Amino acid sequence: MDRSRAGAVGSGFDIGRVLLEGRAYFALVAIVAVFSALSPYYLSVSNFLTMSSHVALFGILAIGMLLVILNGGIDLSVGSTLGLSGVIAGALMQGVPFGPLGVVAYPPVWAVAVLCCGLGAAIGLVNGVLVARFKVPAFVATLGVMYMVRGVALLMTNGLTYNNLGGQPALGNTGFDWLGFNRIAGVPIGIVVMVVIAVIGSVVLTRTPFGRWLYASGGNERAAELSGVPVKAVQVSVYMMSGVCAAVAGLILSSQLTSAGPTAGTTYELTAIAAVVIGGAALTGGRGTVRGTLLGAFVIGFLSDGLVIIGISSYWQTVFTGAVIVLAVLLNAVQYRGRAKRPATAAGPTPSPRPAA
């Protein structure tokens, strides 16, 4: 009877646990409710789509960051990769001169997108090799790559910005602004791209061996390696995927602005990390979902845009965002510490033997 009662209590409704595990949902609902009450324009369809377009950039970056964090790493170079991707796209859209021939080639937009994604994968490969093969701590490796990539972007442009990326019909290089301004069934392209990447990421994590390998290597790298998981290949792969996501975000941002500057994406890596943490992922690796990460991105994006709409100073916006991040980290610590202690608590003391009837 004692064991039955303990089981009933353990399986009962725990409001604290529900609030803790669903904190991203509740935070998003609270943000929408508060700002809708403060401004009649906040929850309009047009404003919702505009805010979602802003969130799409952070959401794409955050999905790539989630893969790295699930592996127990960190990628500080995604903001710089975003900036360099935009600069490369801007340079290609301006034309590639061939000096000896006196010819200027204008590559099609699809070729520009493929080259930029390849660049992102190459930067991720460098990060992955440094971490997996040379055992450089992820923080140090990606911090160094962050500075190098940003430096290359500045050297390419001499600190200037590529403008007028819309192209000219006579040169056949138009269409780059399609990513930033076109819509599918009324939905901006950036949101569609984010949803597609989110679906692919979710399927990879939940339906493929790679997803199982990733969770296993992030939870316990040594045990995963002894179990036959290709730990090093998984590490390199997640950094490459993060780089590709950053490159895609760079293409979308430069298309929305119709310009590409070498300083684009500064501090975006911190926003991506914050979205992953707010979404419930553990910075130690092995725990996290794409759904939670997207919720975290929407929490940050809707909070920032709401503060802008009601006229709060940008300085206070930074304070509020930082407070949300700190609170999310504290709640994550409470959540996962509780999970670690729960099995021992549930087991209880060993019952003393009773005499047979």
Image (cartoon, helix red, strand yellow):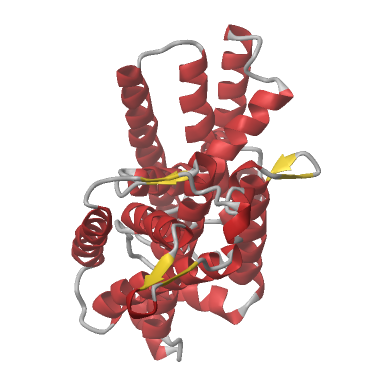
Viewed as shown, does residue 241 lie left or right of 186? left
Q: Is residue 315 above or below residue 292?
A: above
Q: Is residue 211 above or below residue 56?
A: below
Identify the residue shown where x is 33% and y is 26%: 318
Viewed as shown, does residue 90 lie left or right of 186? left
Q: Residue furthest front?
A: 102
Determine the image quadrant of residue 16: top right
Q: Is residue 280 above or below residue 304?
A: below
Residue 113 in percent (x, y) is at 53, 65
Residue 91 in percent (x, y) is at 40, 59
Q: Foreground residue, 246 or 6?
A: 246
Viewed as shown, does residue 354 lie left or right of 203? left
- Quarter holding the C terminus? bottom right
Residue 241 in percent (x, y) is at 47, 69
Identify the residue shown where x is 40% and y is 38%: 328
Q: Foreground residue, 208 or 269?
A: 269
Would you say residue 2 is visible in this rendering?
A: no
Would you say residue 196 is visible in this rendering?
A: yes
Residue 221 in percent (x, y) is at 36, 77
Total labels: the figure holds 0
